[in-house]
Image (spheres, grey):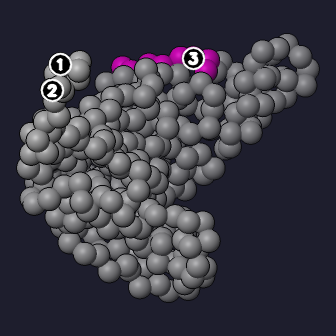
Amino acid sequence: MSPISRGRKPKKPKEQRSRSPRPLDVTRVERWPKLLHGPVELADCVARGEPDRDRVTLAATLTAGKRSVGVEVVVDGDSVHRIELRVEPSDALTSRRRSEVKASLTPEEFRSQVEAALVVMADFDAWLFERVPDFFERWKSDLPARSDQLRRWLGLPEYEPVPRSGADPLPLVLPPPGPVTGLRLAVAVTGPDSAIWRRLEVRSDVTLAGAHRVLAAAFDRDERQNHRFETAYGVFSSDHDGWDGDRPDDEVLLGQVVTAPGHRIVYEVDDWKHWVRVERLVALPEAPRCLDGERAAPPAGCESERSYEMLLEALRDPDDEENEGLLEELGGHGFDPEWFDREGVNARLG
């Protein structure tokens, strides 16, 4: 009796049997080199981030032959925090929160930002390895292996960590100034529950000393205050204020330390820190200008987040005798924390 007459389908010859493709396993980094073979092309490059957090996710689609995967590079501050692959490339590009802002990047900008963050990570890892040689084994971290593979896929050159001097790395060599362009910056004061921020446009060839004067005007501060900039290339401060800094801030251009959307630095005045992030490249502005913002900057009497919180508390009951003294001391008389005057900012910038 034939198989068909017994109610069973005949078996196909082995060469005719279709095999279901095995699902990609992207969780184990040792399998990554087998995922993509040959030259890797980049597409759909984006930078995702939230307005009030100094963390950016650089995402893109990597394609080699007929296979594509998504990659997410989470950059916290100026260093790589995490690298993940996604089987579905679209999963890497999808925003995780409603508040996330997404900016498109060219493949060159994506490579540049990833490389800059990997350089900072490599320098820190070298410093850490000198002090805790078994750190990565102890914590079972495969981030160095992930970064090495990503470098190969993106065609980034090998990088030798910066030599160390004591506890801190030597300043990195500044890149040469690029073509002059306009930079749209998002600047926010870190700390307060209610965000205090400004959106500004400046030229990329302004010095960091000049950028300080722009930021002082944007936040209605005395430009003579102590300040410094923390960048991936070291710390820059004025040469007369006595603050720790690698180099004077009038010897470096803003466009040398931030060059593309997503790049960011930290700006510190007294005890106040601000993150400064490039949102996009724009046409050259005739002069620095403010496009938008929210809330008044803390008055001059508030030199720290704690004193600002005390001021806000005193403003809730200004007739209290004790609060009257605080308002006088902290410059709170006539202060409205919700007030923002864009025209006033641009008048100071002019």
Where residue 100 sits in the image (x, y, percent)?
A: 40, 27
User: Residue at coordinates 37% horizontally, 42% vertically from top-left?
Assistant: 57
Q: Quadrant of the N terminus?
A: top left
Q: CA distance from mark 2 to mark 1?
A: 5 Å
- Picture quarter containing residue 244? bottom right
Amino acid residing under circle 1? Ser
Amino acid residing under circle 2? Ser
Q: Quadrant of the C terminus?
A: top left
Q: Report the front residue among 26 and 342.
A: 26
Q: CA distance from mark 2 to mark 3?
A: 86 Å
Report which residue position mark 2 lands on. Answer: 2
Instruction: Tell me, for residue 5, which label it has, or none.
Output: 1
Earlier residue among tags 2 and 3: 2
Report which residue position mark 3 lands on. Answer: 338
Q: Report the front residue among 291 and 225.
A: 291
User: Is 281 covered by the magenta stretch?
Assistant: no
Where residue 307 sits in the image (x, y, percent)?
A: 74, 37
Amino acid residing under circle 3? Glu
Q: Tell me if label 2 and label 1 are in contact, CB under 8 Å.
A: yes
User: Residue at coordinates 30% horizontally, 58% vertically from top-left?
Assistant: 32
Where residue 45 sits in the image (x, y, percent)?
A: 21, 40
Left or right: 191 as drawn, with respect to 91: right
Q: Nearer the viewer, mark 3 or mark 1?
A: 1
Range shown magenta: 336-348
Earlier residue among tags 3 and 1: 1
Q: How many marks?
A: 3
User: Residue at coordinates 52% horizontally, 29% vertically from top-left?
Assistant: 196
